[in-house]
Amino acid sequence: MKLSCDIAYVGVDDHDVDLFEGQFEVPLGMAYNSYVVKGEKVAVMDTVDVRFGDKWLENVSAATDRVDYLVVQHMEPDHSANIARFAAAYPDAKIVSSMPAFAMMKNYFGTDFADRRVVVKEGDSLDLGGRSLAFVGAPMVHWPEVIVTYDAATKTLFSADGFGKFGANDVEDPEGWDCEARRYYFGIVGKFGAQVQALLKKAATLDIARICPLHGPALETPEEIAHVLKQYQTWSSYGVETDGVCVAYTSVYGHTKAVVEKFCEILKAKGCPKVACADLARDDMYETIEDGFRYGRLVLATTTYNTGVFPKMEEYIRHLLRRNYQGRRVGFIENGTWAPAAAKGMKALLETAKDLSFCGNVVTVRGSMTDETVAKLEALADEILAG
């Protein structure tokens, strides 16, 4: 695949992966992207997952009959696993990366390639003859060693893990870019909003006509690039993307589920533009994390369990907190037959977050739903939708 006359795609698609990073379901597979950039000299941008080393080396060989440099932007093994194989296949090529990345290489491969390494940092460039690759630091997006690379000749930003998404490139995503890119962002990068903001400020100084991430499709139209940058600005600043309510619940015997279903009906009847409801024990946890950040309002409903919060609910809240959940309105529904304590426990966990406002109307159920429960749900709906 050629992206331009002097940039070739040499990555691979993975349709066998069960869980990306050991936790994320990827029903559309996964792409591990790599690129060849040609001037008078030739640079390869990153390697791929260890299982695809043979295919990747074949792709590189088919794209170019010489390689002078391997640029390592990110040392996570889905991108760096074939560095040693590259070094053996191209013994005269130099390896270009940040100093922290070379320290990681020694940990992974037993060597930091001292006789072949070219250490770069922000502001440095690599002359390929007729074109120059400029390096921009992107620490903690989402590992500390990350650099991204700008090719002024084609106005291409090689963005490492930034602006990526779940899904193989040879599979059409029926939901478009946003859905799996959002789940990818909040699942993997969400904690590091400040660092992403710093990278966005640097990117704003560049004339970008193409973005080549290490996962997902290259973004090549002005409309795509503007949209993606806008989404990343919202996500990394923890802004509200969509007007609506995320309702996350757990239910043991179905009583809390029935209450939640009634609550969602009430929200819709009151004109809520979008209600995203998830059963934390059965639905994809990371899609619900995504929705927790997408919407400006969150309602949590769970049973009291061992005098505290049901485990799946506690897990969800801790996932939000690890990703710097902030700036939202939160409501609670609890169920407890003899000593309801879930709402108190959920609030105690969330009080460590920044700029949350909590609804005063807490719905307490003592077993099954009653007319009094419905009246309390009405009051909570009015409060969560206010303002």
Image: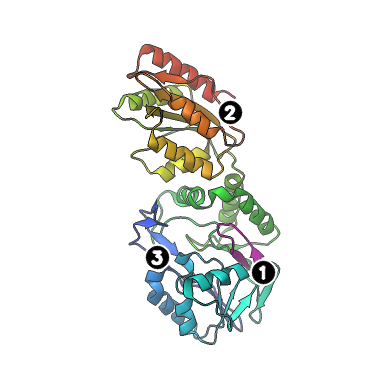
Q: Disc 3 to disc 1, how far (Cα)?
A: 30 Å
Q: Position of residue 88 (x, y in %)?
A: 46, 84
Q: Residue at x 37, y 29 (%)?
A: 305
The residue pinned by badge 2 equals 357
Q: Position of residue 62 (x, y in %)?
A: 44, 81
In the rendering, which numbered label is found on residue 364?
A: none
Q: Quadrant of residue 269?
A: top left
Q: Is mark 1 on a helix, strand or loop?
A: loop
Q: Where is residue 222 in the image (x, y as percent from the top left)?
A: 60, 57
**Does residue 141 show up magenta in the picture?**
yes
Q: Residue at x 45, y 30 (%)?
A: 300
Report the front residue among 185 and 367.
Answer: 367
Main secondary-structure element of the magenta-colored stretch: loop
Whether residue 376 appears in this view of the structure is yes
The amino acid type found where label 3 is placed reads: Asp
Quadrant where the C terminus lies?
top right
- Look at the image and give the residue range highlighted in magenta: 135-149
* Residue at the farthest front position: 306
Of the image marks 3 and 2, the number of the one nearer the N terminus: 3
Mark 3 Cα-neighbour bin, 10 Å: few <14, some 14–19, many ≥20: many
Report the front residue among 81 and 200.
Answer: 81
Say if 159 sits above or below 37 in the image: above
**Does residue 327 show up magenta in the picture?**
no
In the rendering, which numbered label is found on residue 13?
A: 3
Mark 2 Cα-neighbour bin, 10 Å: few <14, some 14–19, many ≥20: some
Mark 1 Cα-neighbour bin, 10 Å: few <14, some 14–19, many ≥20: some
Of the image marks 3 and 1, the number of the one nearer the N terminus: 3
User: Going by the image, does 338 lie left or right of 162?
Assistant: left
In the rendering, which numbered label is found on residue 121?
A: 1
